Image (cartoon, rainbow, N blue to C red):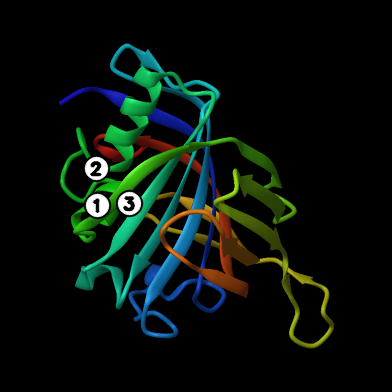
């Protein structure tokens, strides 16, 4: 197994209620699980291949809960990646060189019999974990905009984070409200004011560090 590490940030938006039922062992809000995610790699490697400064993204769809399978996904690698770096990120994000159930990418791959061809596109990011505000543009494929969850009475920003002691994705994430639309890929999704989170990532083939 090739040694790898990714240290960076993630911003994700799915079709479910704020907080994400998956994090609490509950079935998806509307029955299906749909999501987009963007990954910013501050520092990383895959064997001898440096991943420093790269960006990647994914579009995901399952007709039911993730663990029920029959899903599909499409990966997007930032267009600044070399051929070697693209191959490395594809390997990591499709669950290769990863212990069983150790990362979310392993789980996504294991539950998705349909994996669409990986795309290359410019990925623009602007986000702040503490303020729960951010946006991302992934070429002409999809956009995300996130903002704080509004207080149900006053409309003021409602801050909440979740901490997971046994996770294959992150240890702690800031919850937010997200709006996303896909445009140029093969999976059509659209969300408005649904669950989003921004989290720091530190992953290896053995799981969350």
Residue 150: x and y, percent? 75, 75
Q: Is label 2 in a helix, a strand or a loop?
A: loop
- Decide: few, some or many residues near mark 2? Use Cα within 10 Å; few <14, some 14-19, many ≥20: many
Foreground: disc 3 or disc 1: 1
* Local SS, label 3: helix
Residue 207, quarter of the rendered image: top left
Element under disc 1: helix
Query: Of discs 3 and 2, which sits in the foreground?
Result: 2
Q: Residues within 10 Å of mark 1 (few under 14, many from 20)?
A: some
Find disc 1 in the rendering and name its residue. 109
Q: Which residue is mark 2?
A: 95
- The answer to whether the residues at label 1 and label 2 have Cβ atoms under 8 Å apart is yes
Which residue is painted at 19% across and 55% down in the image? Answer: 110
Q: Please, is residue 77 above or below residue 38 in the view?
A: above
Judge from the rendering whether residue 197 lies leftward or rightward of residue 65; answer left or right. right
- If you read the primary sequence from the N terminus, does the residue marked by circle 3 or circle 1 appear first? 3
């Amino acid at each position: 197994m090739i040694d790898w590490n990714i240290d960076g940030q993630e911003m994700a938006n799915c079709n479910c209620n704020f907080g994400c039922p998956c994090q609490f062992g509950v079935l998806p809000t509307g029955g299906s699980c749909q999501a987009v995610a963007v990954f910013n790699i501050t520092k990383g490697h895959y064997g001898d291949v440096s991943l420093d400064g790269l960006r990647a993204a994914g579009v995901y769809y399952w007709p039911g809960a993730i663990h029920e399978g029959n899903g599909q996904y499409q990966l997007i690698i930032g267009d600044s990646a070399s051929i070697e770096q693209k191959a490395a990120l594809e390997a990591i994000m499709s669950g290769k060189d990863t212990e069983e159930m150790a990362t979310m990418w392993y789980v996504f791959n294991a539950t998705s019999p349909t994996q669409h061809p990986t795309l290359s596109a410019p990925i623009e990011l602007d986000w702040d974990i503490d303020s729960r505000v951010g946006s991302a543009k992934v070429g002409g494929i999809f956009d995300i905009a996130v903002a704080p969850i509004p207080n149900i009475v006053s409309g003021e920003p409602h801050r909440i984070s979740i901490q997971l002691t046994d996770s294959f994705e992150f240890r702690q994430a800031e919850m937010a409200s997200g709006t996303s639309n896909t445009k140029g890929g093969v999976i059509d999704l659209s969300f408005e004011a649904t669950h989003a989170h921004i989290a720091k990532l530190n992953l290896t083939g053995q799981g969350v560090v």
